[in-house]
Image: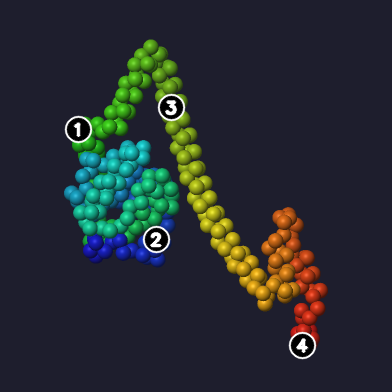
Amino acid sequence: MAAGAAASFGLMDKAYFVGRGEILSWVNATLQLSLNKVEEAASGAVQCQLLDMVHPGLVPMHKVNFDAKTEYDMIQNYKILQDVFNKLRIGKNIEVNKLVKGRPLDNLEFLQWLKRYCDSVNGGIMNENYNPVERRSRGCKERSHKGPTKSSKSLQANRLSSANSADGASPIGKVCNAVNEEHYMEQIQQLSEKIADLKVSVDNTEKERDFYFSKLRDIEILCQRPELEHLPMTKGIRKILYAADAKDSSLPEANEIITRSPGMFSVSDEAE
């Protein structure tokens, strides 16, 4: 399959029905990683290496930052990925702003697409000579030899500053500071994951709310038609729609309006 046709995978393609578990197993087995969640691949480094596997030598792995934590560093990885897409004439749109936020659904969808693409190259046959661990470590070494990036310079300055301020501290104090820092980082990571899950939940709830609201609005418009608004059934429906008290159901009153209306049920209906 040609690389240029890769972006033609539709939303109903079988690629988007692959579950998270299968995606994670595929990524971990292919690149010898141990990801637990799809959003752990939000930095773009995993995607770069997957393309490096199917197109050896095309991805400048020495520029890929597997330690990217900030959005700035992640975006640099996606720039590398976009350059590779351009070389391969892949028209797939990379929604970088969504991916770097670590949203599970966006990262899952992109990995689903990427798996479908990798499976389409060479019939999905993996390169047995490809060593993902060695490729990552070699890339990291080359990147470190070429000098630190702007962000790493800033990080190095912070570390030097922290070291200078901690010179007078005891070894126990230094260990305690390191333990506390690690503990806080774990808490931040856990809270970030909870926030991401809540965002997904809120998005789904808003979609469901809008769906049912549109249905109720359609019913309301239908009940306002002149030839229908005087009917007992219409009055009963409007009684439910415009009920002010959310605790008590208006269904009994609506039923009473319908059943007490003369001529609502014809004699022929009763005979049946």
Q: Which mark is residue 261?
A: none
| Percent of width and height locating residue 176 | 44, 21
Mark 3 is surrounded, within 10 Å at the Cα level, by few (under 14), some (14 to 19) or many (20 or more) other residues, namely: few
Residue ID at (47%, 45%): 196
> Is 94 or 22 nearer to us in this picture?
94
Q: Which mark is residue 145?
A: 1
Point out the frontmost of discs 1 and 4: 4
Q: Which residue is mark 2?
A: 16
**Please, which residue is most extreme toward the front here?**
226
Q: Which residue is mark 3?
A: 181
Mark 4 is surrounded, within 10 Å at the Cα level, by few (under 14), some (14 to 19) or many (20 or more) other residues, namely: few
Residue ID at (39%, 55%): 109
Tag 1 secondary structure: helix
Mark 2 is surrounded, within 10 Å at the Cα level, by few (under 14), some (14 to 19) or many (20 or more) other residues, namely: some
Q: CA distance from mark 3 to mark 4?
A: 81 Å
| Percent of width and height locating residue 37 | 42, 47
Q: CA distance from mark 1 to mark 4?
A: 93 Å
Q: Quadrant of the C terminus?
A: bottom right
The reply to whether residue 125 is in sight is no
Tag 2 secondary structure: helix
Tag 3 secondary structure: helix
Image position of 92 with respect to 62: above or below: below
Q: Which residue is mark 4?
A: 268
| Percent of width and height locating residue 129 | 20, 51
Answer with the quarter of the image where residue 142 lies.
top left
Image position of 27 with respect to 265: above or below: above
